[in-house]
Image (cartoon, rainbow, N blue to C red):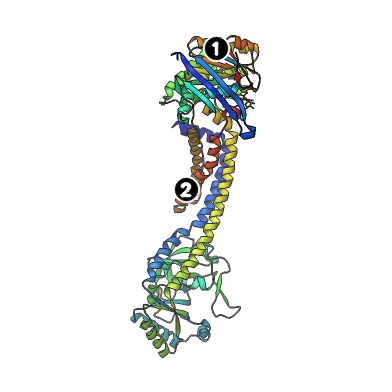
Amino acid sequence: MRGLRYALFDLWHHLPSSLVFGVQFAVALLVVCYAFSDLFPILGDLDTASAHNTVHDYVFEDSSSTQYSGLASEPDHATNQKFIKLYEDIRALNCRTEQIVYGYDGIHEKNGSGHGTFYVNVGFFMRNGLRIASGRKFSANDFRGATKTTPIIIGHNLRDRYRLGKTYVLRHLGDGSKFTAAVVGVLPARSGFDKTGQPGTLTSLDQSCIVPLSDSLVKTHLVDDIYDIILNTTVSTPNLQQLANITTLSMQLSLPTFTYRDVATVDQEYAQDLFLDAFGRFCFAGLILIFACLTIAVNMVRVIKKEERDFAIHLVCGATVACLCLRIIINLLLCFFIVILICSLLFGFGLALVATTIVGVVIVVLTMIYPIWNLTRLNVFRAIGGGE
Amino acid sequence: MSAQELINLKGVSKTFGHDKNRFFALSGVDLTVQAGESLAITGPSGSGKSTLLHIIGLLDDLTYGSYMLHGGRVDHISGRQKAWARNRTFGLVVQDFALIERYSVRQNIEIPLLYRKPRMPRKARMRAIDKVSENLGISDKLKAKAWELSGGQRQRVAIARAIVNEPEVILADEPTGALDTQNSRVIMDLFTQLVAQGKTLVVVTHDQSVAARCNRVLALKDGRLGT
Ligand SMILES: Nc1ncnc2c1ncn2[C@@H]1O[C@H](COP(=O)(O)OP(=O)(O)OP(=O)(O)O)[C@@H](O)[C@H]1O
Ligand SMILES: [Mg+2]
């Protein structure tokens, strides 16, 4: 591989500019990894969200949560029982419930320290305008309880205790049941939500675990009055006839009646929310990539300009422009892969690394267009000092 | 056309610039070079000597006219074929010797061998370099970097690079331009020796003593050939 030998030799010669390339690549790589880390699962979920629509036709939501304010503060045992009865009746009707259940009960670790746990439904993040500091939001799949491992999102203060991407076995304080949880996201500091609709009553999520409320979880846990408050009950049902049945049921139980929304709309809103999130990151990463491309291209033109004489000498000796371009590209790619190697040794990027490698190769090829075009127009005699 | 005829330029013109700025560096040059002859091209600065050498060496395209090499048109062949001809047919020595400073002498001489087709094995390349450097008396300098060399040594390295591939034609652009008479003579001795071995030499020079040692002298003036 004489090309490789010369490329290595040139790499050594161009060490300063190679380092500049390296740093530019590394920064772009880091930013892209950061920005795209959750894009891939989100894209996957957009697909499954549409499959979801065919199963449920309507979602019933309470018209306003203030109706519950009395209920929210001091729910008694009887009320809880009514909810449970309602839930069971709904299940008997073969419907699905999606509820936001604010449990004061906690999840704790083996060493015994407990944290507030919030079981939330699909609209929780959207309704409360919550963002994610790192990782991802819940996907539509998470609410279906599709995986054995429960995805959880943790509050800012827990981020050192539970690591993003790691899996933990947690125990429920109420019934002692164990479940495996994987941390998929971390909330920004001072995240919270308004439970009662009254000003100044923000509930902090900094110390909390957020768990998606899936059907199976509801089934497991909604058997006892461990829930102090049940708000925002959302029921989805296959048809309008079921709505009538449920409304009758809830009236019999003297619970608030429900309004309904098309489940497709709810899912669409959720998907849109996730998409905008991803889109923002995508734009951010795109800008950084464009910036990196531009600086690398400028650097490249500068280096090639400096090396014009050498290129000209090679041309005189029988090189074709194509061979020279190949050499430059091998040189750049070598630089790039050395950077990737070092980065992955340091950070262990995994899948994101593969993705950014592809992005990196695209950068290299794109930034080469102008310098190569320049090279094809090189005036050999001028470059080697002839033709004065 | 004689069998000996190596290079044949007919009505060759070269222009630079466009429209109002259009400028003829060469206009209507007819030139025939026989194999094995030595030809000197002289002329005032800016008369188009380098441009002519440039065109002969297939480093630039001519604007009008035709160029036959070995009796075949070469003015419209592909870049790859031109590169191949530059590699095997021509050996070029430029005014300031155009060495790559950071390469060693051996690496500098090796460049044309690297682009040779079919590929030359490393051992054969090394043998060729050893042979040519011995002829030129630079064997002991093969490991040195180009920037460590004296003017006369650089010149010899440049010549070694031009002849290592055993080209038929040696093109030299003011090879003695920056040298004292002593060194100039050494260089011309070398060239004369190569011509005696059957190489063809085209040398651009201002130096009358260099021109005098060639079979034929042509004068260029404002892009036109005289005698
Ligand atoms: N790439 C170019 N673009 C524009 N003009 C050029 C170019 N190359 C050469 N010329 C012009 O063509 C003319 C001939 O140039 P050339 O280099 O052949 O002269 P020369 O005879 O070699 O001169 P010297 O003895 O000084 O080396 C000059 O006027 C020069 O300015
Ligand atoms: Mg000149």
Residue A112 in sight in this render: no
Vertical side of A347 occupied by A229: above or below: below
Residue under the image location 47 percent in, 73 percent down: A120
| Quadrant the C terminus of chain B occupies | top right
| Disc 1 from disc 2: Cα separation | 54 Å
Element type at marker 2?
helix
**Quarter-wise, where is residue A60 in the image?**
bottom left
Assess whether mark 2 and mark 1 are in contact (beta carbons under 8 angstroms): no
Chain letter for mark 2: A
**Residue A290, which numbered label?**
none
Amino acid on which the number 2 mark rests in the picture: Thr
Chain letter for mark 1: B
Residue beneath disc 2: A357
**Quarter-wise, where is residue A171 in the image?**
bottom left
Vertical side of B69 occupied by A374: above or below: below
Residue under the image location 49 percent in, 16 percent down: B132
- The foreground one among B222 and A242 is B222
Do the residues indicated by labels 1 and 2 lie within the same chain of the protein?
A: no
Residue A300 in sight in this render: yes
Which quarter is ligand 2 in?
top right
Q: Position of residue A311 (x, y in %)?
A: 54, 31
Q: Position of residue A108 (x, y in %)?
A: 46, 70
Amino acid on which the number 1 mark rests in the picture: Leu
Q: Position of residue A140 (x, y in %)?
A: 42, 68
Element type at marker 1?
helix
Residue beneath disc 1: B190
